[in-house]
Image (cartoon, coloured by chain):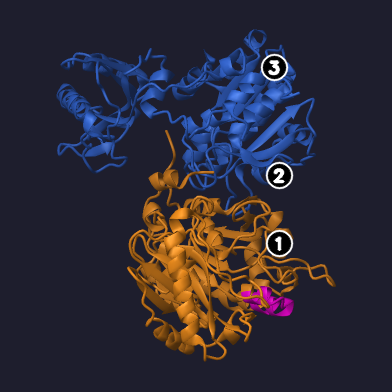
Chain colours: A orange, B blue
C-alpha cells in the first residue's frame, strides 16, 4: 500500500479532470431464480460499451469479509486508511449539515422514534416524519439546559437530527441508546471509560427531559442516540493531492464525508438529473468531481431487486452519457460498498470498479457486472489504492525516485 | 509481504543458477491504430514458446499508480522495500562509476549544459558532449578549492558527471539547480533544512567558480546539479540471500544499483551481444545473474514504437535462446518499470513478468504480452516478492517452521 504521505509528495496540480462517480451499495448478488445479480440483470448498453474500453476490477473497502458503513467506504475511496481514520457517526452527521464542530465537542446522531405506553420502541424512525416537523421538534428540545455545557439540537433530514454537547472535559466513549430493534425500550447511555461517567450522566439527564417534552407528541415521542463522536483529525485529501475538488451529493452524510476530505460541497438537488445538471454547471471550476448516487443503496436496503435494476438502468441512460460528453481525463465508476437486494443490507462483497482514461489497457469486457469486473486486469484490490490510480491516469503524479 | 529478514533466515547456498533479465521500461500501452502494445506487436516466437511453459504475472514496483524511477524499480526487484530504501540520484551516480563514497559524503548528479549570454539554459545536456570532453572538463573543475571540504569531480558517461563533497557536518537536504527545462537560468541551491545552510553556501560558491572556469567553453559552459544524497545504508542482498551474484550492464546507474545490492559488477560492453558474451564467459563463477537491457527503455522514452518493437524482437532472437542454452535453473524476464512509447516516459503501469523453472505450473500463454501476462497464474503482485519466488524455484530456501 502506498501511503497517502508518499502520494502527497508526488502530487502536482494539472488542468486534467477526474470524475469519481460512487453509486452507493453498487455491488449485489445473484437473484435466486435467474442466477444473475442486479448489475448483470440490468440492460446497460452504455456501461457495457464503456467497460469494453476501460480497465475493470473489484475493490475491498476495509478488507476481506468486512462490511463497511458509508463512512469507511467513502474514506477508503478518497485514499484514507479506514481503520486508522475511524470517524464516528455523530461527527459525520454534524459535518453533513455543516454544523461548525469545535475541538472537544461531542456529537451524536439522533433519530426521532415512537415508543408505546410501556416505553417499548414501536418505530425506530417515528413513521419517517418530514424534515419540517423534525425542525420544529428540535427547536423545542433546545429549551433543555444542562449544567456547565452548551447543547445544540439540529435537524438533519426526515426523522434524523444531531445532538452536540460543548464544554470542558467531555468524552465520546459512550454507548448507543438505539437498541437497533423494536419491542424493547431505548437503552440508557453507558460510559465506556471512567472519564466518560460525567458525560453519560449529562446525556441521560438530557434524554429524560426530552422524553418529558415529547410526551404528548405522536408519532415522535422519543429519541434514539448513537455514534457519539468528537470531531475527527483528518488531513484534507484536497491539500495532499493538490486538487480543487467538488462534491455533488443529495444526502447530508455524504456531503459531510466530502467536507471532511476538504472538498467544496455543492448541493445535488433531489434527483440524478439535478446532480448531472450541477456537474455540468461547475465543470470549469474544478479538477476533481465526487458524484454520489444514493438510490442504488436505498433499493438494495429495501430488498427491492427490480428497483435496484431500474436505478442501474437509469444510471446507464442518464449518468454515463452525460459524464462522457464532458470528456473527463479520468472517469471512475464504483460504489462505497455492496448492498445486495437479496441481503437487504450492506455487505462485505467486493465492489465492481471501472477506470476509463486515455492511458488504460482496455480489458474488453463484454457485459458489465460483478463477475466481469472481477476478471478485469485490476483484479481484486484495496479501495485505498483507487486515488493513486486516478491521479496517475490524470498524469497528476511525478515520478518516484531517480 | 515476506520481509527480507525472514527470507534471509531461510536462504541457503546451492549450486543452482538464477538469471534475472531486466528489460528496462519493458511494459507498454496499445498503439492507437492497432490496439496492440509493443510486446503484443513484436514477433517473438522464442518468448511466446517460453511463456507457454512458464508462469506469468504483472508486477508493481512501488505501488498502484506510482511511476518508479530506475532506482526504486531495481531495488524492488532485488527484494528491497523501495519506500524504506530511498536512494538519492547522486549516490547512485557515484556508485555507478565505482566512486568510493564514505559515510558523510554528499554526492550530486551533474550535467554539463549550455547557457546563453543572458544565463538562460539552452541545452540541459550541452549537445550530449562525449565522455572524453566531460573528463577533460571535470579535470579543470578539480582546481576549485573550498574551505574545509574536499571536492571530487568525476566523469560518468557522455555529458554526465558526479560531484562529491567530503568533510564534517555536510547535509544532503539541498534543492536541485536543474530546473528540468530550458529558457530559464539554473536555480541556486537552497537548504531544505537549517542544518544544510552551510553546505548550500559551499555548493553555490563552487557553482559560481565553475561558471567562471567554463565561461569560454562551447557548448559546455555551465553545470546543473540534482539529487544531492549521502551514501545509503542498505543491507547487501547477496549476503542476505547467500548468493554469488554478477551484474551485467552497460550503463553506469544500473551498475551502481547492483553494486549497492552487493553484486559483482561486470562490464557489459556496448551491446546486447556483448552482454550475452559476458554472461557465457562467467557462467561457471556465479549462481545469480542480473542482466540489464537498456534499449527497450531508450526507444520508449523517445516515443519510438517501432524501435521498441525492434528491440523486443532482438531480445527474442538473441537473448532468449542464449539464456536457455545455458540451462539456468530459474529464468525470470521482466522490467524495472513500464515505458509506453505512446507516453514517451516511464509510467505506473504494471510490468509483465515471466518465471521459468522446472517447478513451475505452466500457464500455457499463447502470445507473450501485457494482457497475456496479467491473465497468468501469478496475477498482479508487488515486485518485492520476486526474489522470494526466484530463490524458491531455485530450491535455495529452507522450510519455514516445523
Circle 1 or circle 2, nearest the eye: 1
Q: What residue lies at 48% left-to-right and 84% top-to-bottom?
A: A212
In the rendered image, residue B20, in percent from the top left (x then y), is placed at 63, 25
Q: Chain of mark 1?
A: A
What residue is pinned by disc 1? Answer: A370
**The quadrant where residue A307 appears:** bottom right
What residue is pinned by disc 3? Answer: B17
Q: What residue lies at 71% left-to-right and 11% top-to-bottom?
A: B15
What residue is pinned by disc 2? Answer: B372
In the foreground, A358 or B220: A358
Q: Chain of mark 2?
A: B
Q: Chain of mark 3?
A: B
Most common SS among magenta residues: helix
Q: Which quadrant of the rendered structure holds the C terminus of chain B?
A: top right
Marking on residue A239: none
**Which secondary structure, mark 2?**
helix
In the rendered image, residue A341, in percent from the top left (x then y), is placed at 72, 72
**Which secondary structure, mark 3?**
loop
Amino acid at each position: 500500500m502506498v501511503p497517502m504521505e508518499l502520494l502527497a509528495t508526488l502530487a502536482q496540480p494539472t488542468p486534467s479532470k477526474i470524475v469519481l462517480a460512487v453509486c452507493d451499495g453498487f455491488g449485489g448478488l445473484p437473484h435466486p431464480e435467474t442466477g444473475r445479480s442486479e448489475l448483470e440483470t440490468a440492460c446497460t448498453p452504455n456501461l457495457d460499451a464503456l467497460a469494453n474500453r476501460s480497465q475493470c476490477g473489484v475493490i475491498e473497502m476495509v478488507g476481506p469479509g468486512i462490511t463497511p458503513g458509508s463512512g469507511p467506504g467513502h474514506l477508503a475511496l478518497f485514499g484514507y486508511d479506514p481503520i486508522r481514520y475511524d470517524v464516528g457517526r455523530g461527527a459525520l452527521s454534524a459535518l453533513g449539515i455543516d454544523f461548525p464542530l469545535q475541538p472537544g465537542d461531542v456529537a451524536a446522531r439522533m433519530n426521532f422514534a415512537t415508543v408505546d405506553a410501556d416505553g417499548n420502541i414501536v418505530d425506530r424512525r417515528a413513521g419517517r416524519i418530514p424534515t419540517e416537523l423534525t425542525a420544529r421538534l428540535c427547536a423545542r428540545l433546545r429549551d433543555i439546559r444542562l449544567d456547565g455545557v452548551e447543547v445544540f439540537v439540529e435537524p438533519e433530514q426526515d426523522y434524523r437530527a444531531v445532538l452536540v454537547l460543548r464544554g470542558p472535559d467531555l468524552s465520546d466513549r459512550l454507548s448507543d441508546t438505539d437498541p437497533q430493534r423494536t419491542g424493547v425500550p431505548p437503552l440508557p447511555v453507558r460510559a465506556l471509560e471512567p472519564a466518560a461517567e460525567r458525560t453519560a450522566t449529562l446525556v441521560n439527564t438530557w434524554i429524560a427531559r426530552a422524553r418529558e417534552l415529547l410526551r404528548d407528541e405522536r408519532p415522535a415521542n422519543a429519541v434514539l442516540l448513537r455514534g457519539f463522536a468528537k470531531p475527527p483529525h483528518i488531513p484534507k485529501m484536497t491539500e495532499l493531492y493538490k486538487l480543487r475538488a467538488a462534491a455533488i451529493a443529495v444526502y447530508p452524510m455524504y456531503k459531510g464525508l466530502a467536507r471532511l476530505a476538504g472538498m467544496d460541497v455543492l448541493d445535488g438537488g433531489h434527483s440524478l438529473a439535478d446532480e448531472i445538471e450541477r456537474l455540468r454547471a461547475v465543470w470549469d471550476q474544478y479538477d476533481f468531481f465526487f458524484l454520489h448516487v444514493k438510490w442504488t443503496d436505498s433499493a438494495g436496503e429495501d430488498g427491492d431487486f427490480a428497483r435496484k435494476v431500474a436505478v442501474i438502468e437509469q444510471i446507464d441512460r442518464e449518468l454515463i452519457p452525460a459524464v462522457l460528453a464532458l470528456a473527463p481525463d479520468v472517469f471512475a465508476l464504483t460504489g462505497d460498498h455492496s448492498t445486495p437486494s437479496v441481503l437487504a443490507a450492506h455487505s462485505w462483497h467486493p465492489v465492481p470498479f471501472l477506470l476509463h482514461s486515455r492511458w488504460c489497457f482496455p480489458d474488453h469486457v463484454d457485459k458489465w457486472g460483478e463477475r466481469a469486473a472481477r476478471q478485469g486486469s485490476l483484479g481484486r484490490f484495496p479501495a485505498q489504492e483507487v486515488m493513486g490510480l486516478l491521479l496517475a491516469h490524470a498524469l497528476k503524479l511525478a515520478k518516484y525516485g531517480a
